[in-house]
C-alpha cells in the first residue's frame, strides 16, 4: 500500500494534534476536588508523570525485545537532557495553576512555547517555511501571520468568554480555572505575578525540551548513532524516563531533607496522578514523533493550539463552566484558532536532508 505524499506531509501535524488532545486532557486531574483540597505539592504530581514515562518506556523496549528487533535499546543522553528540561517545566506549570487558574496558566505556557519554538527554529535553525512571491519579484512569509493568529485565537479562548458573559462572570470560567480577566486583589497581586512568571518559564522550558529532540536528532545522525536511540516508540522514551525519574528523585530528596517535607498522600494522588501520567506519556510520544518528522516551528504551534482547545472543551462539555453568550465567544475563538492552525500547516515545507 502506497501512502500518498500529501498524507505523509500532514502526518506530523496529525500526530501533533493528537498529542495536543492528550496534553489538553491531562491537566484536568490537577483540578479534581480531592486534589485541590489536599494541596498536593507539584513535585509529587510530577513524580507520578515521571514514573509512568519510565514504565511506558520500559514496556516499549520490552516489546522490541519480544519482537526480536535489534538493537533492543540504545541509550541516548539527548533523551535525558530533554527530560531535564521537562521536569522543571511540568513543576512550574503545575505550581502556576493554583495561582492563576488552569486556563490562564495553560494559555501563557502554550503561547510562550509556540513563540519560542517558531522563531528560534525558523530563524536560527532555518527550518524550511514556504515563501510567497510579490508581483515585483520580492518574497514574503505567511507563516508568521498564521502563527500570531493562532496565538490571538488562543488568547480569545480565555478573553472572549469573560467579555461575552456580561454580568455573569461565573458562566465564563474557561478551561477549568478562574477567569483570566478577574483582577487579583492587592493582597493576591504578588501571587498572581508569580503564577504568570512560572507559566512563562514552563513555556520556555517546554520549547527547550522539544528543541533538544531536533538538536539531538541532528547530532546523532551526523555521529552515526543507531536510529533506535532516537525512536520515541523505544529507546528515546526509555532514556527520557530514566532522566525524568532521576531529576525528580533528586528534587524530592532535597525537599524531604528540608523542614515540612511534602507528603505523598497516596490515597488521594494515586489515581489522578497515574491518569495524568499515562495521558502525558501519550502526549510525549506523539509530540516527539511529530517533531522528529516535521520540526519544531510549525508543529509546536499546532500541538499547543489543540491543547488549549481541548482543555476548554472539557470545561464546556463536562464541567459546564462556559455557558450562554460566553460559550458563543469561546466557540468563535476555537474556530478561529483551528483555522489559523490548519493554515499554518500549509506553510510548512519538507525538511531538506543532506
Image (cartoon, rainbow, N blue to C red):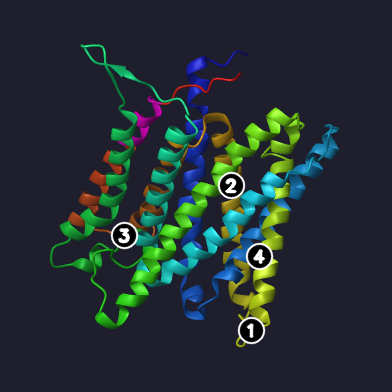
Which mark is first along the chain, 4 or 2?
4
Circle 2 Cα neighbour tier, 10 Å, few/some/many (<14 / 14–19 / ≥20): many
Label at residue 248: 4
Circle 1 Cα neighbour tier, 10 Å, few/some/many (<14 / 14–19 / ≥20): few
Q: Mostly what secondary structure, the magenta segment?
A: helix
Q: Which residue is mark 1?
A: 258
Could you say whether the residue bearing mark 3 is in a helix, strand or loop?
Answer: helix
Quarter of the figure with the N terminus: top right
Q: Which residue is mark 3?
A: 174
Q: CA distance from mark 4 to mark 3?
A: 30 Å
**Closer to the camera, 144 or 126?**
126
Which mark is first along the chain, 3 or 4?
3
Residue pushed farthest left? 167
Q: Which residue is mark 2?
A: 284
**Closer to the camera, 210 or 41?**
210
Residue at position x 52%, y 30% from top?
294
Q: Does the magenta segment cover residue 326?
A: no
Residue at position x 42%, y 67% from top?
97
Circle 4 Cα neighbour tier, 10 Å, few/some/many (<14 / 14–19 / ≥20): many
Q: Position of residue 178 (x, y in %)?
A: 32, 68
Circle 3 Cα neighbour tier, 10 Å, few/some/many (<14 / 14–19 / ≥20): many
Amino acid at each position: 500500500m502506497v501512502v500518498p505524499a500529501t498524507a505523509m506531509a500532514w502526518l506530523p501535524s496529525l500526530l501533533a494534534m493528537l498529542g495536543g488532545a492528550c496534553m489538553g486532557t491531562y491537566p484536568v486531574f490537577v483540578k479534581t476536588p480531592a486534589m485541590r483540597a489536599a494541596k498536593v505539592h507539584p513535585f509529587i504530581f510530577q513524580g507520578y508523570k515521571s514514573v509512568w514515562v519510565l514504565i511506558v518506556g520500559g514496556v516499549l523496549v520490552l516489546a522490541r525485545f519480544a519482537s526480536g528487533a535489534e538493537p533492543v535499546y540504545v541509550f541516548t543522553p539527548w533523551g535525558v537532557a530533554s527530560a531535564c528540561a521537562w521536569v522543571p517545566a511540568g513543576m512550574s506549570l503545575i505550581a502556576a495553576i493554583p495561582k492563576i487558574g488552569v486556563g490562564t496558566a495553560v494559555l501563557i505556557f502554550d503561547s510562550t512555547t509556540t513563540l519560542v519554538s517558531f522563531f528560534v527554529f525558523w530563524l536560527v535553525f532555518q527550518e524550511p517555511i514556504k515563501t510567497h512571491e510579490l508581483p515585483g519579484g520580492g518574497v514574503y512569509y505567511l507563516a508568521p501571520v498564521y502563527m500570531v493568529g493562532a496565538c490571538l485565537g488562543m488568547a480569545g479562548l480565555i478573553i472572549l468568554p469573560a467579555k461575552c458573559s456580561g454580568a455573569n462572570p461565573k458562566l465564563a470560567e474557561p478551561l477549568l480555572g478562574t477567569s483570566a480577566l478577574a483582577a487579583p486583589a492587592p493582597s493576591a497581586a504578588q501571587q498572581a505575578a508569580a503564577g504568570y512568571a512560572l507559566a512563562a518559564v514552563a513555556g520556555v522550558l517546554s520549547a527547550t525540551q522539544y528543541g533538544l529532540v531536533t538538536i539531538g536528532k541532528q547530532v546523532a545522525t551526523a555521529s552515526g548513532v543507531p536510529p533506535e536511540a532516537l525512536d520515541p516508540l523505544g529507546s528515546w522514551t526509555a532514556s527520557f524516563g530514566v532522566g525524568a525519574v532521576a531529576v525528580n528523585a533528586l528534587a524530592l530528596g532535597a525537599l524531604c531533607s528540608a523542614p515540612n517535607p511534602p507528603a505523598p498522600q497516596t490515597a488521594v494522588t494515586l489515581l489522578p496522578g497515574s491518569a495524568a501520567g499515562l495521558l502525558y506519556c501519550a502526549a510525549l510520544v506523539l509530540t516527539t514523533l511529530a517533531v522528529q518528522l516535521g520540526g519544531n516551528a510549525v508543529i509546536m504551534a499546532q500541538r499547543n493550539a489543540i491543547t488549549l482547545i481541548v482543555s476548554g472543551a472539557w470545561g464546556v462539555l463536562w464541567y459546564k463552566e462556559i455557558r450562554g453568550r460566553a460559550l458563543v465567544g469561546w466557540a468563535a475563538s476555537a474556530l478561529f484558532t483551528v483555522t489559523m492552525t490548519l493554515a499554518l500547516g500549509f506553510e510548512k515545507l519538507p525538511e531538506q536532508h543532506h
